[in-house]
């Protein structure tokens, strides 16, 4: 048996897609006999242009072959990402030439990964599973200017429909996506294996040694860690929050992305001297920053598509036992309210609502053992791998 896994991101890259697919491949590998092979085709670390990591172009770990394709550096803009992606797909098709696969598994936040996976599965006569991390067509409609989105929506919808119809099943990383996709594609079998908590964070939550008392009058440290892109909309919330919290809090922003310069410009215009911007850190370094923070901050831009999303950062934050302040609405707000204690949600891009939410938080570490047990990444990815094996065995 030979399985092909296609994902733009894989270890040692820093991204939700990388952490997710690494855990999935580890789980799937453990279930296969040693004479079975998993080929992972991915990119060299490229999630952030400001972060680099050592990597091997070709790596073999047990029954897993990892082939990393070097792509041009990009700043997360649409044009440079498109060129980088074309280079990736050229490398994928070159790698698979002459190889036969029983199953193709594509993890896609951009539609073309799903489409390419479906195309390969069709050419190879393979079964197909898709893991959809973002509703690409729906997102394009929200973020592109009107003159572009109406021209693109129909052809992109046709591509998506064909790719989905080819799959044995399609996983949606957020249950909030289900109503939208079921309405569009009622005949497709959908599953919902969410993101989860990685092993590094399972033991990093509450402890009496790390819990510290916060006294009124102390300067709070509010931390955001992750992508700085259009979807996060940090330039619409952080500068105004910083002005209102001057003398009360320091805001740390750890990460990079297509809107980092916009955020930096906005901070400089408003002369915010209580915001620190730090380039992406390794997970070991990031854990130290998490433990030093008082409040963990999350924000999604004020767009309809983000009413369905479930940011992977929620799981990481919740495992740490820290207070959480989240600018989200719709499904992510419902998820946080139902599952995470000592967390406050507020209307995105509304700085006054953010400050009101901050006032309602208890600035102390707490235990979230039930959440951690329920949303272990290893447990979730093991269940998804079992579903893949069921599909493969049903055809053998």
Image (cartoon, helix red, strand yellow):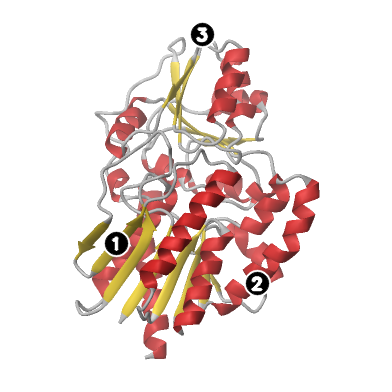
> Which residue bears the numbered disc 1?
66
Q: Secondary structure at mark 1?
A: strand
- Asked if residue 310 shows in the view, the reply is no
Crowding at dot 2, Cα within 10 Å, few <14 / some 14-19 / many 20+, comes out as some
Q: Quadrant of residue 53?
A: top left
- Quadrant where the N terminus is found in the figure: bottom left
- Quadrant where the C terminus is found in the figure: bottom left
Label at residue 247: 3
Q: Which is nearer the eye, 112 or 10? A: 112
Mark 3 vs 1, N-terminal side: 1
Mark 2 vs 1, N-terminal side: 1
> Which residue bears the numbered disc 2?
161
Q: Secondary structure at mark 3?
A: loop
Calculate the distance from the C-alpha at mark 2 to the C-alpha at mark 1.
Answer: 29 Å
Calculate the distance from the C-alpha at mark 3 to the C-alpha at mark 1.
Answer: 49 Å
The image position of residue 197, as x and y in percent, is 37, 50
């Amino acid at each position: 048996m030979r399985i092909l896994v296609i994902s733009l991101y894989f270890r040692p890259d820093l991204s939700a897609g990388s952490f997710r697919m690494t855990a999935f491949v580890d789980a799937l590998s453990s279930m296969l006999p040693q004479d079975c092979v998993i080929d992972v085709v991915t990119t060299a670390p490229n999630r952030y242009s400001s972060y680099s990591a050592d990597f091997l172009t070709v790596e073999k770990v047990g029954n897993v072959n990892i082939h990393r394709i070097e792509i041009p550096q990009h700043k997360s803009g649409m044009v440079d990402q498109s060129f980088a992606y074309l280079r990736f797909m050229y490398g994928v098709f070159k790698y698979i030439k002459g190889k036969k696969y029983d199953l193709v598994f594509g993890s896609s936040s951009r539609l073309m990964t799903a489409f390419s996976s479906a195309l390969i599965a069709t050419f190879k006569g393979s079964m197909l599973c898709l893991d959809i991390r973002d509703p690409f067509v729906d997102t394009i409609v929200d973020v592109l200017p009107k003159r572009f989105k109406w021209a693109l929506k129909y052809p992109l919808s046709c591509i998506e429909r064909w790719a989905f119809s080819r799959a044995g099943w399609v996983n949606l990383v957020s249950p909030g996506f289900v109503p939208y996709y079921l309405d569009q594609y009622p005949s497709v079998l959908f599953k919902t294996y969410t993101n989860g908590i990685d092993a590094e964070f399972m033991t990093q939550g509450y402890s009496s040694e790390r819990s510290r008392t916060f006294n009124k009058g102390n300067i709070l440290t509010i931390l955001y860690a992750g992508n700085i892109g259009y979807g996060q909309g940090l330039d619409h919330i952080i500068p105004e929050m910083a002005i209102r919290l001057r003398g009360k809090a320091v805001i740390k922003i750890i990460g990079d992305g297509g809107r980092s310069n916009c955020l930096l410009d906005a901070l400089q215009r408003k002369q915010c001297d209580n915001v620190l911007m730090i380039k992406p850190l390794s997970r070991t370094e990031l854990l130290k920053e998490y433990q030093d923070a008082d409040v963990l901050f999350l924000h999604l831009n004020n767009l309809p598509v983000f009413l369905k999303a479930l940011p992977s950062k929620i799981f990481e934050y919740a495992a740490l036992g820290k207070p959480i302040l989240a600018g989200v609405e719709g499904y992510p707000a419902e998820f946080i309210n139902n599952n995470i204690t000592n967390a406050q949600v507020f209307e995105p891009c509304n700085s006054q609502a953010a400050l009101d939410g901050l006032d309602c938080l208890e600035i102390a570490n707490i235990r979230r053992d039930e959440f951690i047990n329920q949303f272990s990444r290893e447990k979730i990815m093991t269940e998804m791998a079992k579903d893949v094996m069921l599909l493969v065995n049903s055809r053998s």
